[in-house]
Amino acid sequence: MKIFFTILGCAMLLALGCDKDESKVVDAGPDGGGEGLAFPLVVAVLSDTHLYAETLGMSDQAAQGLQAETRLVAASEAILESTVENLATSDVDLVLISGDLTSNGAAESHHMVAQLLEGLKATGIGVYVVPGNHDVNNQYAVSYETFQDTVPDITPEEFSEIYSDLGPSEAVSTDPSSLSYSVEPLPGVRFLMLDSCLYTTGYHLNGAFSDDTVAWATDQAVEALSEGSFPVAVMHHGLVEHVDSQDTYFAGFLVDDHDAAAQELAGSGVPLVFTGHYHTMDVSMQETGGATIYDAETSCLSIWPFSYRLVTFHEDGKVEMTTATTNDFDFDTGGQDLDTWAQGQLDIAFESYLTDMAQSFGLSAAQTAFAMPAMKDAWKAHMLGDEEYTTEAQQAVAEITSQGGVMILVGGLITKLYNDADPADKELTLDLAN
């Protein structure tokens, strides 16, 4: 495999020109015209935009109830709009979005997402999307004016139509078995936009690939490599565990049979996959069958601190990742500073989410209250990435586990959340050629 990638690196340099200082511009940009693209290729990777169209309405009662959600549903349209405005004036060449474009799959929300992204594409920036588990055939598509009035959702066919100009119409190849497709914005990199979702019977948290989709994806990877392009995958569900025992504690956030899927993709030459769904900023890696594959998960755009990735692809296979945030958007925070308000909303949501989790573990109200501060700190650290297991955090875990019984399990889970294996999560460089 290493020899194969070395040959690939040479092929890429021959295809793109040997002088690294020389501009290497291809004939057509992502829309088939414009100035075209060249290495280094700058890509923004977003995930879980979870947009809820403001035109669907939202009552005060619904807004209060939605505080239990870590994502800021009421502000989601404003957040994506501001992000799009920022990207439009940046040096970004392409935008990849790894699913959960909408909050609950409402057709009206999809049309709003497409409108915003098509406006971004009109500035000359390519945009490629894949669906998330919230997006297609979602039986929970409702107006938050009442929480009960259903609104139209969309079918897989309608997803392809709505987002046709945001990836599918530029496909090098389309998978007949799913909404997966591949695009090659310039010679040297091919993005495998993989549909990992289960929606034939409605909303599902978990996802899976059919054998046919895996075969199509691996064929695309091999073809890309043979033509001198690195195959990079984009999908909603995680491929590699982002926390020890993720399958046990957080079932449904990894694609089914993820080890087998990782082995198939890595074995066919895919060294990197961008994922979402789990709402954390984390990079994990897995060595399988003599190959290594990296899973770069991007956090939810509508959760503080509203982060996304900026990824620079170089012609020699080097990939540099940094983290950007949307620092300002138009939303009524009741007079509070935006950052203070957003963190306060997240704290409220964590309290609700972790209380439910504690109850599922069988903790009493007193045990939950005792462990809550440490659980919130751990989950926030895990969500932000590059976790640091401080002395204070370790002392808190020791106090929790000293109570014995189920509290030992709680302390163990907190430790797992802090255990951030290599590589770094937010700022890192990978070498796809080696």
Image (spheres, rainbow, N blue to C red):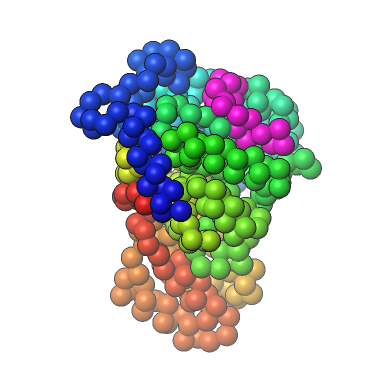
Q: Residue at x 59, y 44 (%)?
A: 218
Q: Residue at x 51, y 68 (%)?
A: 244
Which picture quadrant has residue 202? top right
Relative to residue 338, is residue 138 drawn left or right? right
Q: In this orientation, which residue lies closer to the viewer: 226 or 22? A: 226
Residue 329 makes an appearance in the image: no
Relative vertical location of residue 24 with respect to residue 262 in this rendering, above or below: above
Relative to residue 154, is residue 363 drawn left or right? left
| Image location (x, y in percent) of residue 418 | 41, 67
Relative vertical location of residue 229 with respect to residue 291 in this rendering, above or below: above
Farthest-out residue, right: 201
| Image location (x, y in percent) of residue 119 | 46, 18
Relative vertical location of residue 55 with respect to residue 46 in this rendering, above or below: above
Q: In this orientation, which residue lies closer to the viewer: 101 or 274? A: 274
Which picture quadrant has residue 36? top left
Q: In this orientation, which residue lies closer to the viewer: 251 or 344? A: 251
Q: In this orientation, which residue lies closer to the viewer: 166 or 249? A: 166
For the stretch drawn in magenta, the main secondary structure is loop
Give the tally of numbered discs: 0
Relative vertical location of residue 433 with respect to residue 73 in this rendering, above or below: below
Farthest-out residue, left: 21
| Image location (x, y in percent) of residue 69 | 55, 48
Q: Residue at x 47, y 17 (%)?
A: 31
Q: Residue at x 57, y 56 (%)?
A: 263
Q: Is residue 175 magenta?
A: yes
| Image location (x, y in percent) of residue 306 | 41, 42
Q: Is residue 103 magenta?
A: no
Magenta part of the protein: which range? Answer: 164-181
Residue 350 makes an appearance in the image: yes
